[in-house]
Image (cartoon, helix red, strand yellow):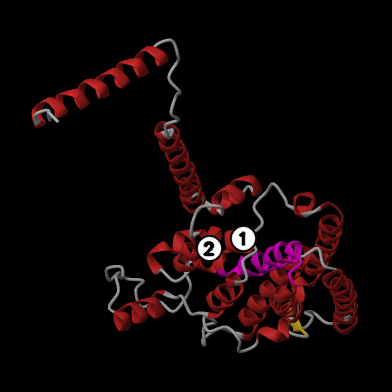
Amino acid sequence: MRTQPLCQLQMAKSVRYLCVFACGLLLTAGETPEEVPQPNLQSGTKNRSAATVETRTRSNALDDLLASTPAHGISLDKANQALQSPGAVARLIGTLTTWKDRSQWSNTTLLLGLSGDERAYEALMEFLNRDDSPAAARSRCASTRSWCEPSSRKADSTALERDVYGAKMSVPVALGLLVYQIQQRNQPQSHEVVESAINELKSGSRAKYWKGRIAWAQPGMSPQERAALHTDLSARCIRGLGFTGSSQAKEHLEGLRDHLQRLIAKSAAAGAGETHSHPFVDGYLTSMLPSLVATAETAIARNAAIASGGLRAGYPPAPIQ
Protein backbone atom coordinates (compact mmCIF):
# COMPACT_ATOMS: atom_id res chain seq x y z
CA MET A 1 0.00 0.00 0.00
CA ARG A 2 1.14 3.40 -0.96
CA THR A 3 1.73 5.75 2.01
CA GLN A 4 1.38 9.56 1.87
CA PRO A 5 4.37 11.63 2.75
CA LEU A 6 4.34 13.19 6.26
CA CYS A 7 4.12 16.71 4.88
CA GLN A 8 0.91 15.86 2.99
CA LEU A 9 -0.72 14.41 6.16
CA GLN A 10 0.05 17.56 8.17
CA MET A 11 -1.34 19.74 5.37
CA ALA A 12 -4.60 17.74 5.35
CA LYS A 13 -5.05 18.20 9.10
CA SER A 14 -4.46 21.95 8.81
CA VAL A 15 -7.12 22.19 6.10
CA ARG A 16 -9.65 20.37 8.30
CA TYR A 17 -8.96 22.73 11.30
CA LEU A 18 -9.38 25.79 9.07
CA CYS A 19 -12.75 24.48 7.83
CA VAL A 20 -14.02 23.90 11.38
CA PHE A 21 -12.90 27.41 12.44
CA ALA A 22 -14.56 28.99 9.39
CA CYS A 23 -17.84 27.18 10.08
CA GLY A 24 -17.75 28.40 13.66
CA LEU A 25 -17.37 32.00 12.49
CA LEU A 26 -20.31 31.62 10.12
CA LEU A 27 -22.56 30.20 12.87
CA THR A 28 -21.79 32.98 15.38
CA ALA A 29 -21.65 35.88 12.95
CA GLY A 30 -25.27 36.91 13.68
CA GLU A 31 -25.06 36.57 17.49
CA THR A 32 -24.37 39.37 19.95
CA PRO A 33 -21.33 38.48 22.07
CA GLU A 34 -22.11 38.06 25.76
CA GLU A 35 -20.94 41.04 27.84
CA VAL A 36 -18.48 40.12 30.57
CA PRO A 37 -19.14 42.21 33.73
CA GLN A 38 -16.18 44.35 34.76
CA PRO A 39 -15.47 45.58 38.34
CA ASN A 40 -16.63 49.14 38.93
CA LEU A 41 -13.25 50.55 39.88
CA GLN A 42 -14.48 54.12 39.55
CA SER A 43 -17.34 53.49 42.01
CA GLY A 44 -14.96 52.02 44.61
CA THR A 45 -12.67 55.01 44.26
CA LYS A 46 -15.61 57.37 44.74
CA ASN A 47 -16.74 55.50 47.87
CA ARG A 48 -13.25 55.65 49.36
CA SER A 49 -12.97 59.33 48.52
CA ALA A 50 -16.35 60.06 50.12
CA ALA A 51 -15.35 58.16 53.28
CA THR A 52 -12.07 60.08 53.44
CA VAL A 53 -13.86 63.41 53.05
CA GLU A 54 -16.37 62.45 55.77
CA THR A 55 -13.57 61.43 58.16
CA ARG A 56 -11.76 64.72 57.54
CA THR A 57 -14.99 66.65 58.07
CA ARG A 58 -15.52 65.00 61.47
CA SER A 59 -11.90 65.53 62.43
CA ASN A 60 -12.14 69.20 61.44
CA ALA A 61 -15.33 69.50 63.48
CA LEU A 62 -13.44 68.25 66.55
CA ASP A 63 -10.60 70.70 65.86
CA ASP A 64 -13.09 73.57 65.57
CA LEU A 65 -14.82 72.71 68.85
CA LEU A 66 -11.56 72.40 70.75
CA ALA A 67 -10.30 75.69 69.37
CA SER A 68 -13.54 77.59 70.02
CA THR A 69 -13.84 79.91 72.98
CA PRO A 70 -15.47 78.13 75.97
CA ALA A 71 -17.82 81.11 76.36
CA HIS A 72 -19.50 80.05 73.10
CA GLY A 73 -20.72 76.81 74.65
CA ILE A 74 -20.91 73.46 72.87
CA SER A 75 -23.72 72.51 70.51
CA LEU A 76 -25.04 68.96 70.93
CA ASP A 77 -25.24 68.45 67.17
CA LYS A 78 -21.67 69.65 66.59
CA ALA A 79 -20.41 67.58 69.51
CA ASN A 80 -22.06 64.43 68.17
CA GLN A 81 -20.50 64.98 64.75
CA ALA A 82 -17.05 65.67 66.19
CA LEU A 83 -17.12 62.66 68.49
CA GLN A 84 -17.65 60.33 65.51
CA SER A 85 -14.18 61.08 64.18
CA PRO A 86 -11.75 58.14 64.53
CA GLY A 87 -9.90 58.11 67.85
CA ALA A 88 -11.79 61.16 69.15
CA VAL A 89 -11.93 60.01 72.80
CA ALA A 90 -8.28 58.96 72.87
CA ARG A 91 -7.31 62.33 71.43
CA LEU A 92 -9.41 64.20 74.01
CA ILE A 93 -7.83 62.25 76.87
CA GLY A 94 -4.41 63.08 75.45
CA THR A 95 -5.33 66.77 75.24
CA LEU A 96 -6.11 66.81 78.98
CA THR A 97 -2.55 65.70 79.73
CA THR A 98 -0.85 68.23 77.47
CA TRP A 99 0.01 71.54 79.12
CA LYS A 100 0.34 73.49 75.88
CA ASP A 101 -3.28 72.57 75.05
CA ARG A 102 -4.69 74.01 78.27
CA SER A 103 -6.74 76.64 76.43
CA GLN A 104 -8.78 73.70 75.06
CA TRP A 105 -9.28 71.93 78.40
CA SER A 106 -12.73 73.35 79.20
CA ASN A 107 -14.23 72.15 75.94
CA THR A 108 -12.30 68.90 76.18
CA THR A 109 -13.87 67.99 79.53
CA LEU A 110 -17.41 68.61 78.25
CA LEU A 111 -16.79 66.64 75.06
CA LEU A 112 -15.49 63.72 77.11
CA GLY A 113 -18.70 63.83 79.13
CA LEU A 114 -20.83 63.89 76.00
CA SER A 115 -18.86 60.98 74.55
CA GLY A 116 -20.45 58.49 76.94
CA ASP A 117 -17.17 56.56 76.87
CA GLU A 118 -16.26 54.77 80.11
CA ARG A 119 -12.60 55.74 79.69
CA ALA A 120 -13.59 59.36 80.23
CA TYR A 121 -14.39 58.84 83.93
CA GLU A 122 -10.86 58.15 85.13
CA ALA A 123 -9.41 60.78 82.79
CA LEU A 124 -11.77 63.45 84.18
CA MET A 125 -11.16 62.51 87.82
CA GLU A 126 -7.40 62.48 87.34
CA PHE A 127 -7.55 65.89 85.69
CA LEU A 128 -9.75 67.38 88.42
CA ASN A 129 -7.35 66.35 91.18
CA ARG A 130 -4.07 67.02 89.35
CA ASP A 131 -2.07 70.14 90.17
CA ASP A 132 -1.90 72.13 86.93
CA SER A 133 -0.38 75.30 88.28
CA PRO A 134 2.47 76.70 86.13
CA ALA A 135 5.04 75.58 88.71
CA ALA A 136 3.72 72.01 88.80
CA ALA A 137 3.44 71.87 85.01
CA ARG A 138 7.04 72.98 84.53
CA SER A 139 8.19 70.42 87.06
CA ARG A 140 6.42 67.64 85.13
CA CYS A 141 7.85 68.89 81.84
CA ALA A 142 11.35 68.81 83.28
CA SER A 143 10.96 65.30 84.71
CA THR A 144 9.60 63.87 81.45
CA ARG A 145 11.86 65.99 79.22
CA SER A 146 8.81 67.00 77.21
CA TRP A 147 8.10 70.35 75.58
CA CYS A 148 7.30 73.16 77.97
CA GLU A 149 6.77 76.87 77.64
CA PRO A 150 9.69 79.25 77.97
CA SER A 151 10.32 80.77 81.38
CA SER A 152 8.11 83.68 82.29
CA ARG A 153 7.38 85.71 85.38
CA LYS A 154 4.44 83.38 86.11
CA ALA A 155 6.39 80.18 85.55
CA ASP A 156 6.86 79.53 89.27
CA SER A 157 3.30 80.45 90.27
CA THR A 158 1.43 77.87 92.35
CA ALA A 159 -1.94 79.45 91.52
CA LEU A 160 -4.05 78.11 88.66
CA GLU A 161 -4.46 80.23 85.57
CA ARG A 162 -8.01 81.45 85.00
CA ASP A 163 -8.71 79.14 82.02
CA VAL A 164 -7.30 76.15 83.87
CA TYR A 165 -9.45 76.88 86.92
CA GLY A 166 -12.51 77.09 84.66
CA ALA A 167 -11.64 73.74 83.09
CA LYS A 168 -11.33 72.08 86.49
CA MET A 169 -14.71 73.48 87.48
CA SER A 170 -16.35 72.07 84.35
CA VAL A 171 -15.49 68.49 85.34
CA PRO A 172 -18.56 67.89 87.58
CA VAL A 173 -20.94 68.88 84.77
CA ALA A 174 -18.94 66.64 82.41
CA LEU A 175 -19.40 63.76 84.87
CA GLY A 176 -23.15 64.38 84.91
CA LEU A 177 -23.28 64.32 81.12
CA LEU A 178 -21.18 61.15 81.10
CA VAL A 179 -23.59 59.41 83.48
CA TYR A 180 -26.57 60.25 81.28
CA GLN A 181 -24.90 59.17 78.04
CA ILE A 182 -23.67 55.87 79.50
CA GLN A 183 -27.10 55.11 80.96
CA GLN A 184 -28.65 55.40 77.49
CA ARG A 185 -26.62 52.40 76.36
CA ASN A 186 -28.04 50.30 79.20
CA GLN A 187 -25.02 48.00 79.36
CA PRO A 188 -24.57 46.05 82.63
CA GLN A 189 -20.78 46.33 82.50
CA SER A 190 -21.09 50.12 82.67
CA HIS A 191 -23.01 50.09 85.96
CA GLU A 192 -19.87 50.48 88.08
CA VAL A 193 -18.75 53.62 86.24
CA VAL A 194 -22.21 55.17 86.54
CA GLU A 195 -22.38 54.46 90.27
CA SER A 196 -18.87 55.81 90.86
CA ALA A 197 -19.61 59.04 89.00
CA ILE A 198 -22.95 59.62 90.75
CA ASN A 199 -21.42 58.91 94.16
CA GLU A 200 -18.58 61.31 93.41
CA LEU A 201 -21.06 64.05 92.54
CA LYS A 202 -23.23 63.36 95.57
CA SER A 203 -20.22 63.46 97.89
CA GLY A 204 -18.82 66.53 96.16
CA SER A 205 -22.06 68.45 96.69
CA ARG A 206 -21.06 68.62 100.37
CA ALA A 207 -18.40 71.27 100.93
CA LYS A 208 -16.66 69.30 103.69
CA TYR A 209 -15.88 66.55 101.20
CA TRP A 210 -13.27 68.69 99.44
CA LYS A 211 -11.10 69.35 102.47
CA GLY A 212 -7.60 68.10 101.61
CA ARG A 213 -8.76 66.38 98.39
CA ILE A 214 -7.48 68.67 95.66
CA ALA A 215 -3.77 68.99 94.98
CA TRP A 216 -4.07 72.47 93.52
CA ALA A 217 -5.60 74.14 96.61
CA GLN A 218 -2.88 76.52 97.71
CA PRO A 219 -1.45 76.01 101.22
CA GLY A 220 -1.50 79.74 101.87
CA MET A 221 -5.27 80.10 101.44
CA SER A 222 -7.17 81.75 104.27
CA PRO A 223 -10.01 79.71 105.84
CA GLN A 224 -12.55 81.93 104.07
CA GLU A 225 -10.85 81.50 100.68
CA ARG A 226 -10.74 77.74 101.18
CA ALA A 227 -14.42 77.66 102.15
CA ALA A 228 -15.24 79.68 99.01
CA LEU A 229 -13.35 77.17 96.86
CA HIS A 230 -15.07 74.20 98.47
CA THR A 231 -18.47 75.87 98.10
CA ASP A 232 -17.82 76.58 94.42
CA LEU A 233 -16.91 72.93 93.85
CA SER A 234 -20.08 71.89 95.66
CA ALA A 235 -22.16 74.13 93.39
CA ARG A 236 -20.57 72.54 90.31
CA CYS A 237 -21.39 69.05 91.61
CA ILE A 238 -24.99 70.10 92.22
CA ARG A 239 -25.20 71.24 88.61
CA GLY A 240 -23.58 68.00 87.47
CA LEU A 241 -26.23 65.94 89.26
CA GLY A 242 -28.89 67.85 87.34
CA PHE A 243 -27.50 66.58 84.02
CA THR A 244 -27.68 62.90 84.97
CA GLY A 245 -31.45 62.56 84.61
CA SER A 246 -31.15 60.05 87.46
CA SER A 247 -33.84 59.43 90.08
CA GLN A 248 -31.06 58.77 92.58
CA ALA A 249 -29.60 62.20 91.85
CA LYS A 250 -33.03 63.84 92.09
CA GLU A 251 -33.60 62.40 95.55
CA HIS A 252 -30.19 63.59 96.72
CA LEU A 253 -30.73 67.08 95.31
CA GLU A 254 -34.04 67.48 97.07
CA GLY A 255 -32.54 66.40 100.38
CA LEU A 256 -29.55 68.70 99.89
CA ARG A 257 -31.77 71.68 99.07
CA ASP A 258 -33.70 71.15 102.32
CA HIS A 259 -30.42 70.83 104.24
CA LEU A 260 -29.10 74.09 102.79
CA GLN A 261 -32.31 75.89 103.69
CA ARG A 262 -31.96 74.69 107.28
CA LEU A 263 -28.37 75.97 107.33
CA ILE A 264 -29.56 79.40 106.18
CA ALA A 265 -32.17 79.49 108.95
CA LYS A 266 -29.61 78.32 111.50
CA SER A 267 -27.07 80.92 110.38
CA ALA A 268 -29.69 83.69 110.54
CA ALA A 269 -30.71 82.67 114.06
CA ALA A 270 -27.10 82.46 115.23
CA GLY A 271 -26.32 85.88 113.76
CA ALA A 272 -29.35 87.66 115.24
CA GLY A 273 -28.18 90.57 117.33
CA GLU A 274 -24.60 90.25 116.05
CA THR A 275 -22.83 92.61 113.70
CA HIS A 276 -21.53 89.79 111.51
CA SER A 277 -22.67 86.17 111.21
CA HIS A 278 -20.14 83.34 111.03
CA PRO A 279 -18.42 83.41 107.59
CA PHE A 280 -18.88 79.68 106.96
CA VAL A 281 -21.09 76.88 108.24
CA ASP A 282 -20.87 73.12 107.64
CA GLY A 283 -17.95 73.80 105.30
CA TYR A 284 -19.94 76.17 103.08
CA LEU A 285 -19.32 79.87 102.72
CA THR A 286 -22.36 81.33 104.47
CA SER A 287 -22.83 84.14 101.98
CA MET A 288 -23.12 81.60 99.14
CA LEU A 289 -25.87 79.48 100.74
CA PRO A 290 -28.82 81.27 99.06
CA SER A 291 -27.24 80.88 95.61
CA LEU A 292 -26.61 77.20 96.36
CA VAL A 293 -30.30 76.70 97.09
CA ALA A 294 -31.16 78.34 93.76
CA THR A 295 -28.59 76.12 92.02
CA ALA A 296 -30.18 73.04 93.59
CA GLU A 297 -33.65 74.12 92.46
CA THR A 298 -32.41 74.59 88.89
CA ALA A 299 -30.66 71.21 88.98
CA ILE A 300 -33.83 69.47 90.21
CA ALA A 301 -35.84 70.99 87.37
CA ARG A 302 -33.19 70.10 84.78
CA ASN A 303 -32.94 66.55 86.09
CA ALA A 304 -36.70 66.10 85.68
CA ALA A 305 -36.66 67.57 82.16
CA ILE A 306 -33.84 65.29 81.04
CA ALA A 307 -35.42 62.24 82.67
CA SER A 308 -38.66 62.77 80.76
CA GLY A 309 -37.50 64.34 77.49
CA GLY A 310 -33.89 63.34 77.02
CA LEU A 311 -30.68 65.35 77.21
CA ARG A 312 -31.76 67.86 74.59
CA ALA A 313 -34.75 68.83 76.77
CA GLY A 314 -32.47 69.97 79.58
CA TYR A 315 -29.38 71.00 77.65
CA PRO A 316 -29.08 74.78 77.79
CA PRO A 317 -28.23 76.88 74.73
CA ALA A 318 -25.96 79.01 76.93
CA PRO A 319 -22.53 77.79 78.13
CA ILE A 320 -22.84 75.21 80.91
CA GLN A 321 -19.35 75.25 82.39
The tag on residue 89 is: 2
The answer to whether residue 286 is above or below residue 301 is below
Q: Mark 1: which amino acid? A: Ser
Image position of 135 (left or right of 186):
left
Q: Position of residue 119 (x, y in %)?
A: 58, 72
Q: CA distance from mark 1 to mark 2?
A: 7 Å
The answer to whether residue 158 is above or below residue 148 is below
Image position of 303 (left or right of 54):
right
Residue at position x 48%, y 72% in the image: 160
Instruction: Verify CB contact (< 8 Å) between mark 1 and mark 2.
Output: yes
Furthest-top residue in this view? 30
The tag on residue 115 is: 1
Q: Mark 2: which amino acid? A: Val
The answer to whether residue 187 is above or below residue 82 is below
Q: Secondary structure at mark 2?
A: helix
Q: Earlier in the sequence, mark 1 or mark 2?
A: 2
Q: Position of residue 272 (x, y in %)?
A: 89, 80
Residue at position x 36%, y 78% in the image: 156
Residue 220 in view here: yes
**Residue extent of the magenta highlight:** 168-187
Q: Nearer the viewer, residue 45 or 36?
A: 36
